[in-house]
Image (cartoon, rainbow, N blue to C red):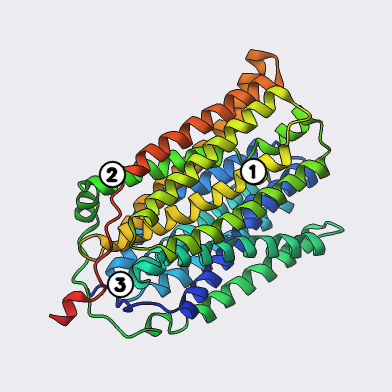
């Protein structure tokens, strides 16, 4: 079977079109991992462990990302995998929402539906997201990769914000029927946007010659894991995403327990953090592309800067946990978001470069391997952060000491990630279709 036809280099319009797909993925995932979490616990009175377990399940399913990436490597195009993944993702979200009204009268059937729905959500995210990243890696010229990563991830955040805003505005007063209508509307809109955005996308630039037959999955995995740079980058992805995800579930409880903030005040910190993330993404996207190819501007430098900045911000939160009220918490959270944004965009840009630099048609498998490492880290990190705080509070009998311990561990993980990142070789990917000119 022929390898995917790859463009010689996507223009900015094509990159924005891929960003629209990323926004669509984020909009639907928000329903499953955020809105349904709140509805299950608050409106349906379920134990918090139930939605947490379902979210962990959707991450576990994404361990199969290398399989889906390999499938897109072996096909003639990646866009069908993106469209198919969105269809599975949307169907899973609808199935999970449909299970909620059955929970009281038919718990077994509701449980089967919810489990099936979140398995589909994980599969859809994995198939669509891995193929999207692989297409970016093979279709975006090296100097544009940092900016392309920034554009697509900023659009994903905007998709999440827009979806959350629409759902929040229309869901009051709450009813199961209203929730289903809102979910269906967002799913249909996201799927339609994906179809429109990907129409003839892989023909948007001059076509490239095929890179050769994609190897079997086992052969591709062995070849990738035999490369020192691929192994090092896999370790980096795991460590950094573990540190990144540990803070997700504990920042708002930290603000409430240690600083006495109300729910509204602590929720506003999330907006401050995401604002910092967006600014950091823009800075890294512009800077990483503007200095592409110069030693001082290598993406590994931006990655290390983002990791070190995140470590310092988390060390600041550890000190804040000790001193309590009076610590500049809002500024500290903004600094953390800014550093996280720099780290995220530069890491994704480096991921694209390393995926495109490998031999053979293996961008999908490479992205799948790193996506699986990220999924494992996110699943472990969120749970570890929350459980770690509970255990530390029980052992230390002090909220401040408990959060100080966890934030310090996160800071050390980011510092370790920076050390690993400095050893990553940022070789430029070979020019696409170089062999076609021979």
Pointer 2: what residue?
231
The nearer-to-camera label among 3 and 2 is 2
Q: Is residue 363 visible?
A: yes
Q: Secondary structure at mark 2?
A: helix
- Residue shown at 30% from the left, 43% from the top: 423
| Earlier residue among tags 2 and 1 | 1
Left or right: 375 in relation to 44: left
- Residue shown at 20% from the left, 75% from the top: 434
Query: What mark, if any, has residue 87 been given in the picture?
Result: none
The nearer-to-camera label among 2 and 1 is 2
Left or right: 359 in relation to 150: left
Mark 1 crowdedness (10 Å alpha carbons): few <14, some 14-19, many ≥20: many
Q: Secondary structure at mark 3?
A: loop
Pointer 3: what residue?
75
- Residue shown at 43% from the left, 79% from the top: 11
Assess whether mark 3 and mark 1 are in contact (beta carbons under 8 angstroms).
no
Left or right: 235 in relation to 305: left
- Residue shown at 63% from the left, 65% from the top: 159
Question: Disc 3 to disc 2, how far (Cα)?
Answer: 26 Å
Left or right: 113 in relation to 299: right
Question: Disc 1 to disc 3, how far (Cα)?
Answer: 35 Å
Pointer 1: what residue?
51
Q: Is residue 105 visible?
A: no
Mark 3 crowdedness (10 Å alpha carbons): few <14, some 14-19, many ≥20: some
- Of the 4 image quadrants, the one containing the N terminus is bottom left
Percent across and percent down for residue 302 are 44, 51
| Earlier residue among tags 3 and 2 | 3
Q: Secondary structure at mark 1?
A: helix
Question: Disc 2 to disc 1, how far (Cα)?
Answer: 33 Å
Whether 327 is drawn above or below 50: the answer is above
**Quadrant position of residue 357:** bottom left
- Of the 4 image quadrants, the one containing the C terminus is bottom left
């Amino acid at each position: 079977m022929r390898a995917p036809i790859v463009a010689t280099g996507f223009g900015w319009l094509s990159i924005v079109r891929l960003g629209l797909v990323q926004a669509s993925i984020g909009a639907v995932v928000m329903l499953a991992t955020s809105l349904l979490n709140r509805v299950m616990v608050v409106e349906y009175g379920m134990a918090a462990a139930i939605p947490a377990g379902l979210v962990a399940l959707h991450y576990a399913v994404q361990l199969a990302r290398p399989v889906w990436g390999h499938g897109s490597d072996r096909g003639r195009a990646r866009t069908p995998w993106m469209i198919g993944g969105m269809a599975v993702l949307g169907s899973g979200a609808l199935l999970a929402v449909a299970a909620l009204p059955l929970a009281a009268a038919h718990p077994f059937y509701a449980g089967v539906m919810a489990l099936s729905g979140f398995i589909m959500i994980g599969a859809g995210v994995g198939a669509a997201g891995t193929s999207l990243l692989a297409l970016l890696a093979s279709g975006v010229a090296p100097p544009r990769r940092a900016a392309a990563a920034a554009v697509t991830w900023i659009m994903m955040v905007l998709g999440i914000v827009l979806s959350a805003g629409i759902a929040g505005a229309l869901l009051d007063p709450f009813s199961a029927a209203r929730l289903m209508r809102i979910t269906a509307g967002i799913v249909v809109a996201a799927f339609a946007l994906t179809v429109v955005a990907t129409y003839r996308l892989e023909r948007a630039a001059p076509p490239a010659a095929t890179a050769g037959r994609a190897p079997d999955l086992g052969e591709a995995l062995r070849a990738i894991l035999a490369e020192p740079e691929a192994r090092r980058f896999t370790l980096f992805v795991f460590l950094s995403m573990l540190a990144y995800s540990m803070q997700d579930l504990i920042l708002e409880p930290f603000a409430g327990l240690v600083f006495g903030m109300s729910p509204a005040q602590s929720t506003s910190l999330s907006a401050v953090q995401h604002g910092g993330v967006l600014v950091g993404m823009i800075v890294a996207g512009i800077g990483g592309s503007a200095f592409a190819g110069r030693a001082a501007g290598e993406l590994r430098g931006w990655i290390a800067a983002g990791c070190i900045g995140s470590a310092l911000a988390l060390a600041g939160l550890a000190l804040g946990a000790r001193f309590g009220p009076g610590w500049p918490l809002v500024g500290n959270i903004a600094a953390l978001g800014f550093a996280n944004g720099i780290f995220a965009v530069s890491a994704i840009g480096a991921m694209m470069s390393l995926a495109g630099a490998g031999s053979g048609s293996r961008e999908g498998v490479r992205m799948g391997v790193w996506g699986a490492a990220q999924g494992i880290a996110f699943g472990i990190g969120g749970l570890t952060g929350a459980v770690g705080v509970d255990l530390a509070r029980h052992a230390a009998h002090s909220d401040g000491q408990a959060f100080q311990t966890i934030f310090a561990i996160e800071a050390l993980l980011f510092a370790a990630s920076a050390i690993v990142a400095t050893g990553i070789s940022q070789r430029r990917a070979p020019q696409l279709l170089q062999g076609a000119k021979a």
